[in-house]
Structure formats: structure tokens, C-alpha cells
Image (cartoon, rainbow, N blue to C red):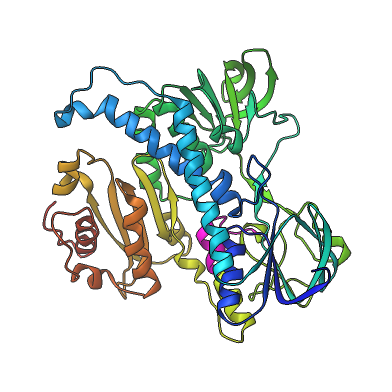
Amino acid sequence: MDNSSYDVIVIGAGPAGYVCAIRCAQLGMSVACIDQWSDKNNKPSPGGTCLNVGCIPSKALLDSSHHYSFINDHASEHGIDISESEINVTKMQQRKNKVVKTLTTGVKGLLKKNKVEFFHGSASFVDSNTVKISGDTEQSISANSIVIATGSKPFELDFLPIDQKRIIDSTGALALTSVPKHLGVIGAGVIGLEMASVWSRLGAKVTVWEAVDQFLPLVDKDIANQANKMLSKQGIQVQLSCKVLAAEVNKNDVKVTVSDSDGESQIDVSHLLVAIGRVANTQGLALDAVNVVTNEKGFIETDDQWQTNIKGIYAIGDVIGGAMLAHKGSEEGVALAEHLSGQHGHVNYAAIPWVIYTWPEIAWAGDTEQVLKEKNIQYNKGQFPFMALGRARAMGDSEGVIKFLADANTDQLLGVHIIGPNASELIAEGVLALEAELTAEDLARTIHAHPTLSEGLHEAALDVADRAIHF
């Protein structure tokens, strides 16, 4: 199939790439999708970081560790007496790998079902219409439109080389074969806190160092403060305004040098996780061959229709920066496909849900209180605690709160913020309200089933007008 021609070539089969490829095919275009992810047998494993070493495996481990934590810490409250429990990390990892394999195989099936031609290998630009595929064999294919959806990779510090043994990144944290004695984590962001939660629940001592002086600065302050207290109660120690200066790897541990307001100090950890963000994955694409422009941080620059500075070359997902979320990339993939077919694809970046899968979960969409104050927007606030919900009490999960922010003049919802059980699912109603430009009154007049956790959204909406019933 050397020099075959397509309407669209998509480079990358992560949530942005494979979704874009499938939608393009649904709209009648001939599509090729190139992806280099492989499983341990060097077989194709589409799904990108998300399915292979990100969203999916991390949630598998979070769920497994949550079950273990429940058995040890809460089962007796429900009248379930378990004399002794033991974690088998090998079986837990096998289950995680099975989940990953099932879903990556599913992506291959979806591409085939939608008649997307799939190529396993790495891609590089020859010119603005031609891509070379390097795999078991080399070949070149061409298209009028080429979409870069190669995602991101962990940011590395020069003085902390990742060896995936003692100094690890998120990929290494997902593959540990035993519970660390003491896990040190650089970065109190989403990845750092989720991995801290997994291994803390399974018995590891966990210390998290964060360079800035605010915990979860993107999160509403009320929610972030509660999260810090809850995680601390679970045994996760977070040290703010604390920088890691160096790390010395020894046979059985890592000696970490940190600096805070008290000066420099050293601490020994068994493993050190570097979780300080992600950078665009453009290595090997030969972008210079076609003069595609990247910004000072290495992300590909695009216009409002995801086209780069080169006509016919587009980019979506993590590789263009912004909210580095799988669902954001997928929506960009759909919108770009529709744009390429002559329709009007659109992504509402103001209504993207964010989730941190600690327990309780943290989820939000729209503006925080601090942002509204910066914008000088007058707002009303409604809150409702999970402890006042019958369903939360029955579950034994009653920590947390739901918070709504609404325009003081129009009552239109501006932000939805949740910390509590199943926040990742509850946030969808808030996102729908933001997308549809609903008011707090609209949600207050929407009947919610009883007893459910979603009643908290109803009560928080009522509280915007100071008329919550159950608190």
C-alpha cells in the first residue's frame, strides 16, 4: 500500500486521534490512522496514554485500592466482619492489565468497524501532504488533511533521571510490583495525588512536595481546603512551598534534598515519583520538515479551527496544550472532523469537566470563586453538604460538599464544584447546566430521585436563593 492516498491521515490513536479518525470515516472520508503504542508482545495497542498508561490503568488501581481500603477501614461499620485481609499486588496488576487489553482491543475493533485503515508504527512528515510510516516495514502515505494527535509525555527534570526503578514517572507508578515502603511524590497535581492515594491505601507512607504555596490552585479554594484536610486524615502528607533540589539513588532508597521556609533538609524514601506535569509529544514527527510552529513550551500552535500555520495540517488534544484531558481531546477530534466535512464543529472550553479521582472525588466545571472575583463578577453561592443527604449517610460516605456559583443578576450558573462520593459522575449534570446556560432556579425546579446523591445538586441550587430544605 506504499504511497496510498486518503482524505485524512490521523497521527496518533489516543482519545483525540481515534475519535477524530472514526468521526471522519462516519462523515464519508477515507481515513488512515497511525499509532506506535505496543503491548508487551509488541502488538498494536491503540488508545494512547489514556488507555495504556493513564486514565484507565490508574482508575483500575484506584478502584482496587479503594476496595481494599473499604475492607480494612469501613467494612465493620456495615456489619461485615473480615478478620484479616491481604493485598496481592501481582493479581491487582494482572487485573489492571486485563482491563487495558480489553479496551485497547476494543479501539482496534472500532477503527476496523468504521473502515479506518490502521497502521502500526511511528510517523514522520515528508512534506505537508505526505507521511512516512516506520514499523515492521517502511512506507509513505498521503492526504489532503493531516491531523497530529500524538498526545503528551511526562515532564522530566534534568537532575532527576527517570530509571523506573527508584525514580519513577506516572508510568512507573502504575507498574510497581510491590507496595513502596515510603513513596515520595514531587507535585501535588492530579497525577501525584491519584498515585499517592493508590499506594497510601495499600499501606505505603506517602509524602508529597509541592513547590507553590497553594494546594490545588485550579480548584475552588473551599473545595481545595477540604481536600487537603481529608487527604491528610488519610495519611497523605502534603508539604506546600517545598522544592526538591536533588535526589541520590542508593541500593534500597532515594535520599531526597528539599528546601522550605526552614531551610534545606533530607529525607529517605523507597521510591520517588516525579509528577510535575506533561509536555507535548512531538519527538520524531519531523515537524521542521514542514515548518509547523510550536510555542515556547513545545506545544503545537493552532487557530480556532485547530489548523496549524501550515494549510492542511491540524493538531488536537494534549499536543496543543490547554486542558490536558482525554475528553477535551475527544471533543476536539469530533469538532475537527465535522469542520473538515464542511460542518461547524465546536468545543465549549468553558464547560469542560475536571476530575481528581481521590476519595472523596473532586470534580468541577466553570469558574471558581477566586476567578469570579478576579473578573469582578457579582455572584450568589449555594452549598449543600453530603452529610445532610440520606443516601450518603446510608452509604457511609458523607464527607464533602456541593457548591454552585450563579450570576447575581441573571441567576445563570457560572461554576459547579464538588468534593464527595461519586463527584466524577455528579459533575455531568453541572456541565449540562453550564452548556445549556441554565439558571440555578432551573435546577432547583428539576425533580431529583430520592434517595440519591444527586439530590445534593438540587439542594445546592435551592441554596443559591437561600431556600435549601434539608440543611
Q: Is residue 350 among what the camera can see?
A: yes
Which residue does the image show at 55% across and 59% down from the upper left? 107
Quarter of the figure with residue 129: bottom right
Q: Quadrant of residue 313?
A: bottom right
**Horizontal side of residue 187 vs 441, given as left or right:** right
Q: Residue at x 49, y 34 (%)?
A: 94
What's the magenta region? 321-331
The foreground one among 441 and 73 is 73
Asked if the magenta segment contains residue 323, the reply would be: yes
Q: Residue at x 48, y 67 (%)?
A: 350
Q: Is residue 172 above or below residue 324?
A: above
Determine the image quadrant of residue 360. Answer: top left
At a point 16% along the width and 68% down the height, the residue shown is 447
Question: Can residue 237 be seen?
Answer: no
Residue sitting at the far front? 1
Residue 308 drawn at (x, y percent):
74, 71
Quarter containing the N terminus: bottom right
Residue 181 at what x, y percent from top left? 50, 17
Q: Is residue 94 magenta?
A: no
Vertical order, 23 against 167 (above or below): below
- Quick check: 10 above or below 100? below
Give the total of numbered labels: 0
Residue at the extreme bottom of the image, as rendered: 342
For residue 314, side relative to residue 69 (left or right): right
In-image side of 117 versus 411 (left or right): right
Image coords of residue 347 (percent x, y): 52, 72
Q: Position of residue 198 (x, y in %)?
A: 44, 33
